[in-house]
Amino acid sequence: MDLTGKTLFIANRGEIAVRINRAAKALGMKVAQAYSEADADMLAVRLSDDAYEVGPPQAAKSYLDIGRLLEAASQSGADAIHPGYGFLSENAEFAGAVDEAGMVFVGPAAETIALMGDKAAARAAAVRAGTPVAPGSDGRIETPADARAVADRIGFPLMIKAAAGGGGRGIRIARNQEDLERLVPQARSEAQAAFGDGGLYLERLLENARHVEVQILGDGKRAIHLFERECSLQRRRQKVWEEAPAVCLSDDQRQSICEASVKLAESVSYRGAGTLEYLFDPGAGTFAFLEMNTRVQVEHPVSEFVTGVDIVQEMIRLAFGESLSLSQNDVSRNGHAIEVRVNAEDPMNNFMPFPGVVGAMSVPDNVRFDTMLYEGYAIPPFYDSLLGKLIVHGETRADALSKLQAALAEFKIEGLKTTLPLYEMLALDPDVAADKFHTQFLENWLETHLSVPA
């Protein structure tokens, strides 16, 4: 399908809006950009063909207001709406409303989002597809008695998890019965406040595991994978450093986890770009399904680097009804990529947020920097602190790590405190270089090296 001249409305902000803008224009599309009052000067607005204010700085009154977004998209003459990540990207109501308004939602069908967005329902779908899962509850727990019964059956430690969760919210770790009784109400209350859904489920905690995820593309009938990424370096369950491939996997383990992901995606008739997330136990050589993200991921560039596939362009084509243009045999891996998330936070001061005015920037050559920044831009204090992602690619992991070290030494953003100094330290850490880390590694490392509490 020729998309030349069609209009894509971007219902998001920041670096991902810039990324989507560039992908759409590469397809010959026109771009209309949503923005709040606080974002009138953002780079995505400057790059767009048209821009539409959708409300005040508060996200609930702008980027999360379905009515305002649809009105603006309609005014723009949009053929399609791309939700990016965060905000309404995994909101089944929004996806359905876009369809009802006669526009294309760049993502899976609303029914698929609803199914896989409910973590307990997604877990059940994984079980039906034969995908390994951690021992846990069969669906949601409704009463304290339900929680006790699961604990009696599978033992401690347990993860208490929000069924509608994401971003590490609504999660607690119970190491005994007393913890379980105390933490279930806390997790339920946080989940209700964060997602409007206080539903919970339980899973056995896999400690010192690796976080591995598989990127897939599907057209509703057939799916393929773009291999896997590792995202084990996390703070408070928020990823900060991602790599592709996951060198902790053997070839057989890689094939197994990727094939299981394709099977699960096809079992739910998945259309678009999606990510299957797992915990991998290196000692046992086993993995357990965590969740499916029904949107583009922040860390998608590392998969693009090693496969050469433009994921954002592909998801736009698929949304317009195209069949997959690639077979699995068309996808191969090339080298190793590492991404670090550059946030407006001071890692030397307990990650205190640091919005400000961007001064002179110096971005090294031979790297990819997906960002919303430009010199003189005043970063609004109302949103997530992510400024951009620095991505490097090398023939081997050691080569990529060396390139990252060199890039970090040259990279300069004046006027702000950012997380770049943290990555300079991590890139030189012998355990990181030796691939000796897990999902709890960074928080322990921060306590030791920067006195940052977990």
Image (cartoon, rainbow, N blue to C red):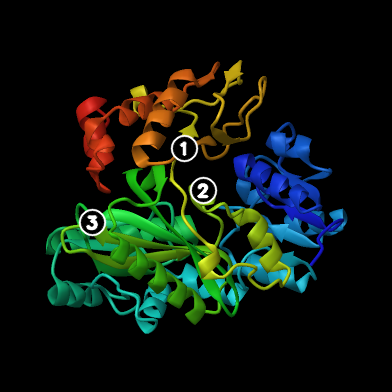
Left or right: 189 with respect to 42? left
Tell me how many marks there are.
3
Q: Which residue is mark 2?
A: 298
Please rate how many residues cluster around mark 1, counting C-alpha atoms within 10 Å: few if below 14, some from 14 to 19, many from 20: many
Left or right: 208 with respect to 247? left
Q: Which residue is mark 3?
A: 173
Instruction: Check the image and name the residue furthest to the bottom.
Output: 128
For residue 383, say whether it is visible: yes
- Mark closer to the chain start, 2 or 3: 3
Please report the residue visible at 39 percent of the width from the left and 81 percent of the height from the top: 129
Residue 37 lies in quadrant: top right
Amino acid carrying label 3: it is Ile
Please report the residue visible at 60 percent of the width from the left and 58 percent of the height from the top: 88
Amino acid carrying label 1: it is Arg
Any mark on residue 157, and which?
Answer: none
Left or right: 285 with respect to 60? left
The percent position of residue 290, horizontal first and vertical second, equals 35, 64
Where's the C terminus, which quadrant? top left
Please report the residue visible at 70 percent of the width from the left and 34 percent of the height from the top: 42
Q: Secondary structure at mark 3?
A: strand
Q: Secondary structure at mark 1?
A: strand
Q: Secondary structure at mark 2?
A: loop
Q: Which of the two marks, 2 or 3, is nearer to us in this view?
A: 2
Could you tell me how far apart the alpha carbons at marks 1 and 3 are, in whole angstroms?
Answer: 26 Å
The percent position of residue 39, horizontal first and vertical second, equals 69, 36
Could you tell me how far apart the alpha carbons at marks 2 and 1 are, in whole angstroms?
Answer: 9 Å
- Residues marked 2 and 3 touching at CB (< 8 Å): no
> Vertically, is 132 above or below 2?
below
Q: Which residue is mark 1?
A: 341
